[in-house]
Image (spheres, helix red, strand yellow):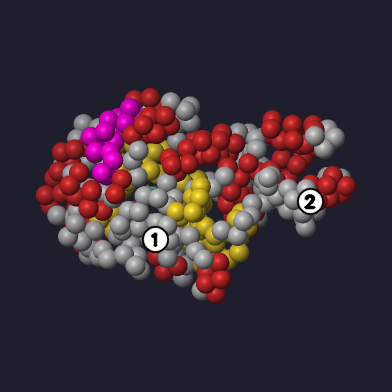
Amino acid sequence: MITKLLDYNKTELIEIVAAYKQEKFRAEQLFTALHNGKDYDDKMNLPKSFLNTLKENEIILQPAKIIKEKKSKSDKSTKFLFELFDGNLVEGMLMQYKFGSTICISTQVGCKMNCLFCASGLNGFVRSLSVGEMLGQVIAVNKSLGGTVKKREITNVVLMGGGEPLDNYANVLKFLQIITSDDSFNFSVRNISVSTCGIPHKIETLADSGFPVTLSVSLHAPTDAIRKKIMPIAKSYPINAILESAKYYNLVTNRRVVFEYTLIEGVNNRPADAKALAELLKDFPCHVNLIRLNEVTGRDFKAPTVDSCKKFLEALQRMQISATLRRTLGDDVEGACGQLKNRVKESAKKE
Ligand code: SAH
């Protein structure tokens, strides 16, 4: 079995290292080195013989390596292509704002959900990412910005890249445990967002997990009939059940839930849809994040005009719904919402 050391928390790493007859402080040094993005070729303050033994045993230090970076010309965002230890590729985005830098990472190679407007499911589902592969994306980008584990250059992490985080729940939870620990990056849960297509029982489990991250629910429709046309998962879970679980999340965590609503021309952007959405969400302390559809090659839907998106926003606000229209970042590098997908290695490298 292939061992990826970043899949483990510090306590577990101490045990693994003990099997190599190394003392606890070596495990601690190794843990820090891994979170600083060190690999076999880098300088590390660990005995060469120990590192050689790890290498001989095919133990992987960095399971997600940046193999390509594409900077947007129009804004301060960068798309990253990561190669995983087994050759699979996933994408992530770095968005640099005045207040800090947000990294959007992938949680799966491909996606099972197959939302009809999104690129993530276009090449099918391959597999879920391990803890270390999610962590590895943060580590690699932090390192590329000149950050370290104790002086990080990344302020926010969002699980909104390829894949459905709650379909990889156990690994996502352990990822949250590690990344928020002070052994590691010490992120505050307030600076982490998890986005889901809406799986009610998993939302409730996350509420009870003790990690009150910002929860984003991809709603995209005010009625089940419209939702079923664009999101196959809507056939399994009605909006009412999703809303109940979001309310439970809010009750347990005291966090305001964000509803993502991608505006698609002629599908969910009529005045009647704004009205139905406001009716659905009234009296619930939430926020609606409107996103103008990023058109995806291989998908049929069209983006509404910016003007009509603004009208939809104003309609919601008039009906006392807290809402914003999200600025699109990175669309010229196909890094905007829903444009991230798993790629096939050779063609991706050539692009
Ligand atoms: N599976 C998770 C996270 C991945 S997508 C989820 O469904 O939330 C992150 C967000 O981008 C989701 O709200 C998703 O619905 C949205 N999105 C997907 N494709 C899009 C597109 N083409 N244009 C705009 N937003 C899109």
For the residue pair 92 and 21, the one nearer the viewer reads as 21
* Rendered location of residue 286, percent (x, y): 29, 37
Q: Quadrant of the N terminus?
A: top right
Q: Circle 1 is placed at which residue position?
A: 122
* Residue 55 marker: 2
Q: Is residue 236 magenta?
A: yes
For the residue pair 279 and 209, the one nearer the viewer reads as 209
N-terminal of the pair, mark 1 or mark 2, is: 2
- Left or right, 195 with respect to 102, comes to left
- Left or right, 261 with respect to 202, comes to left
Element under label 1?
loop
Assign the magenta stretch its main secondary structure.
helix
Residue contact at pointers 1 and 2, CB within 8 angstroms: no
Residue for point 43% across, 40% down: 166
For the residue pair 132 and 177, the one nearer the viewer reads as 132
* Rendered location of residue 200, percent (x, y): 33, 34
- Left or right, 306 with respect to 249, comes to left
Q: Which residues are magenta?
A: 234-250
Q: Quadrant of residue 88?
A: bottom right
Query: With respect to residue 347, does 21 lie above or below?
Result: above
Residue for point 29% across, 49% down: 232
Three-letter amino acid code at the position of disc 2: Lys
Give the spatial CA distance, label 1 vs label 2. Answer: 36 Å
Q: Is residue 72 magenta?
A: no
Residue for point 26% across, 33% down: 241
